Image (spheres, rainbow, N blue to C red):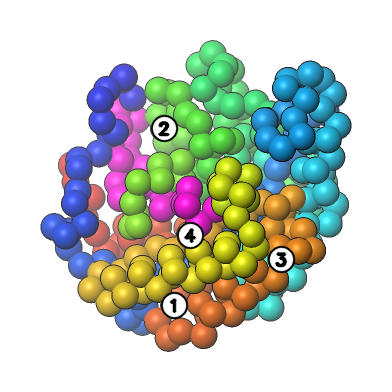
Amino acid sequence: MEPQRYGPFPYSPINRRPKLEWPNGARIALCVTPNIETFSLNEKMPGGAGSSGGIIPDVNVWSRRDYGARIGIFRIMEVLERHGIRATAALNADTCDLYPEIVEDAIKLNWELMGHNESNTRRLNSVPASEELGIIQRSLARITKATGKRPTGWLSSGMQQSWNTLDFLIQEGISYVADWVNDDQPYTMTLPAGQIVAFPYSAEANDRRVYDSLHYTAEEFETLLKRQFDVLYREGAQSGRVMSIALHPFLSGTPHRIDAVDGALRYICAHEGVWLATGSEIVNHFKSRIQPPG
């Protein structure tokens, strides 16, 4: 993609689109995305509470995230299985080597796995184009080797892209990308390399923003998820919506927060017309129903 003022897609106001219909007349397609991530102790960690300010090693911030891999992710798995939800997990490829048991359990649960860079301490917009393509290729190859399935979706670490990212993803056979958080429905992006679908990942129904940036309580996060659902469910009666919930095991997987996820999902799943879907199921249905521009 050449540098430009707007994205590689036409502006499309929600009140001027064709009706989007989900299977069996569902109003909402619910997709839960745990972020299964690795962080290198010998690299600069992201900022946040207790951060060393870039000094390595940042034991406080690193070990907080490692808690999510050791304990938190398994609490999230238990809750999602209880509600019959197959997650669409964003997987750092290094997880396959550092935390192979997590990948093993995700496979047993039949989770869908998206590419999510190699490590969360390295971002695509901070490396040369040749290295960026290598990161994408190595990430997809490592996940494919570990799981036997090549990912069809992608979420960049930190949701950060370069001008080349979308073309590289299309070149590598990725059909949808979750970095663009500007819609409640999927839409098609057209680039020189071809087309790719933007999947409605959420920066709002996202525990990273809620807990680390807004400093909400667990009860407030549960309320936020229920209110998000109520509005999308109401609007979904006219045209289908996607409700995406982004979870980070080091946040929502802690003892004092996990019941907020459980309570919100219990509320959502008690409604008729909720399609529990994975990213690729949503995108494939969308592509079968909506003729992309071009």
Q: Nearer the viewer, residue 180 or 228?
A: 228
Residue under label 4, please give it. 244
Label 3: which residue?
258
Which image quarter: residue 2?
A: top left
Q: How dense is the environment of label 3, judged by Cα within 10 Å: few (below 14), some, or many (20 and up)?
A: some
Neighbor class of circle 4 (other Cα within 10 Å; few <14, some 14-19, many 20+) is: many
In whole angstroms, how far apart are the C-alphas of marks 4 and 3? Answer: 17 Å
Left or right: 87, with 66 as reference point: left
The vertical placement of 265 against 279, above or below, is below
The residues bearing labels 4 and 1 have C-alpha atoms spaced at a distance of 12 Å
State the SS at label 3.
helix
> How far from the left and from the top, in percent, is residue 129?
50, 16
| Magenta segment includes 195 | yes
Q: Is residue 45 left or right of residue 273?
A: right
Magenta-colored span:
187-206
Nearer the observer: mark 4 or 3; the answer is 3
Q: Secondary structure at mark 1?
A: strand
Can residue 130 be seen in the rendering of this structure?
no
Residue occupying the point 19% across, 48% down:
12
The residue under label 2 is: 166
